[in-house]
Image (spheres, rainbow, N blue to C red):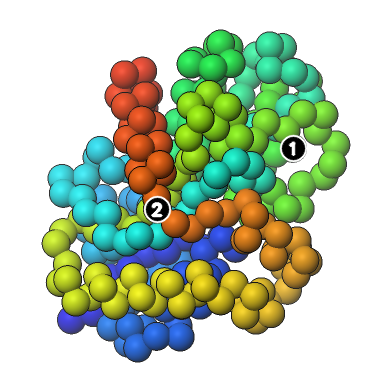
Amino acid sequence: MKVRVSAVSYLNTLPFIHGINQSDLRNEIDLSLDIPSDCAQKLLNDEVDLGLVPIAVIPQLKEHYIISDYCIGAEGKVDTVALYSDVPLEEITHVYLDFHSKTSINLVQVLAREYWEISPNWMDAGKEFIQEIGGKTAGVIIGDRTFALPKSFNYKYDLAEEWKKMTGLPFVFACWVANKKLPQSFIDNFDKALSIGVNAIEDVIESKDKRAITKKELSNYLTHNIDYNLTNDKLKALSKFLDYIKANEISNTFS
C-alpha cells in the first residue's frame, strides 16, 4: 500500500518535489499538492499519512512524528510571509489573516502580543482580502502570491525577521510530520529523496515552469530566504513557538 503524502504547493517546496520525482520513492507514495492549511487538515483527518504541514497543527494531532531532517524554515527574512500595511504598527487597528496557513496567523498574533505590543482587531480573510488592505487595516499575506503584490503598501513586516529580532532564533513554518509510525526504511529513503532536491536547487530552478517570478528571483529566494535544514536551533524555535501559542491561548484550529 502506498504512503499518502500531502505537500505544500508553493515555490519553496519545489526542491522537495524535485527530489521525490528523481527518486525511486515516487512509486511508493500517493502525492497531493495543497495549500498549507489543507495539508494540515488532511493530516488531522487521516486522509494522508505524512504531510509538510504548518507546525501549529502539531499539538492537535493524537500522534505526531517529525520524520525528516528537512523543513521550510528561515534564518532571517523569508520574504513571503509578511504583514502589509499603509501605516506603522502602532496605528494599525484591524488585521486580515490569510487563510492559507494558521502558523502564520499564530505567528503574527504572538508578535503582536509579545513584541510589538499592539492589540488590533483580527479578521478572517476572504479570497479577495488583499484589495481590502488600506488605511489602518493591514493584512498578513503568505506564499507565492506575495511575488505579484503591487508595490503600493508603505510597510512590510517580515514575520520571520521579526521573530528573529524577538527571540534570536530562526523560524520553522512547516516540517514533515506523520500521524502514525512509518517504517524506518521508508523514512530513510524519504529523507534521501528530499536531500536530492535540496542539493540540486539550480537544477530545480532551470526546470521550473513560468510563474510570476524570474529565475534570478527564484534562485535568491530558494538559496537565501528559505533554509531547508531542520537544525537544533530550529527545533528550539519550534518548541518555543508552540509554547507561546499555548501560553497565550491563541486559537490554532484548522476548521
Name the spot of residue 203 as percent of width and height, x first.
Answer: 62, 80
- State the residue at coordinates (70%, 39%): 130
Name the spot of residue 207 as percent of width and height, x first.
Answer: 65, 81
Q: Quadrant of the C terminus?
A: top left
Residue 91 appears in the rendering:
yes
Q: Is residue 178 left or right of residue 221?
A: left
Q: Quadrant of the N terminus?
A: bottom left
Residue assigned mark 1: 131
Identity, as a three-letter code, of the amino acid under mark 1: Gln
- Closest to the observer: 252 or 65? 65
Residue 54 appears in the rendering:
no
Which residue occupies the extreme right position in the image? Answer: 152
Q: Please report whichever mark, 1 or 2, sits nearer to the chain's N-terminal start.
A: 1
Q: Is residue 124 left or right of residue 3?
A: right
Is 41 drawn above or below residue 67 in the view shown?
Answer: above
Identity, as a three-letter code, of the amino acid under mark 2: Leu
Q: Which mark is residue 207?
A: none
Residue assigned mark 2: 230
Q: Is residue 32 left or right of residue 204?
A: left
Q: Gap in Å between the C-alphas at discs 1 and 2?
A: 35 Å
Name the spot of residue 101 as percent of width and height, x first.
Answer: 48, 44
Name the spot of residue 182 as percent of width and height, x first.
Answer: 17, 67
Please identify, in this view, whether the residue under mark 1 or under mark 2 is nearer the observer: 2
- Closest to the observer: 233 or 196? 233
- State the residue at coordinates (64%, 55%): 224
Q: Is residue 20 left or right of residue 188?
A: right
- Closest to the observer: 87 or 166? 166
Looking at the rendering, which quadrant does residue 236 occupy? top left
Label 1 packing within 10 angstroms: few (<14), some (14-19), many (20+): few
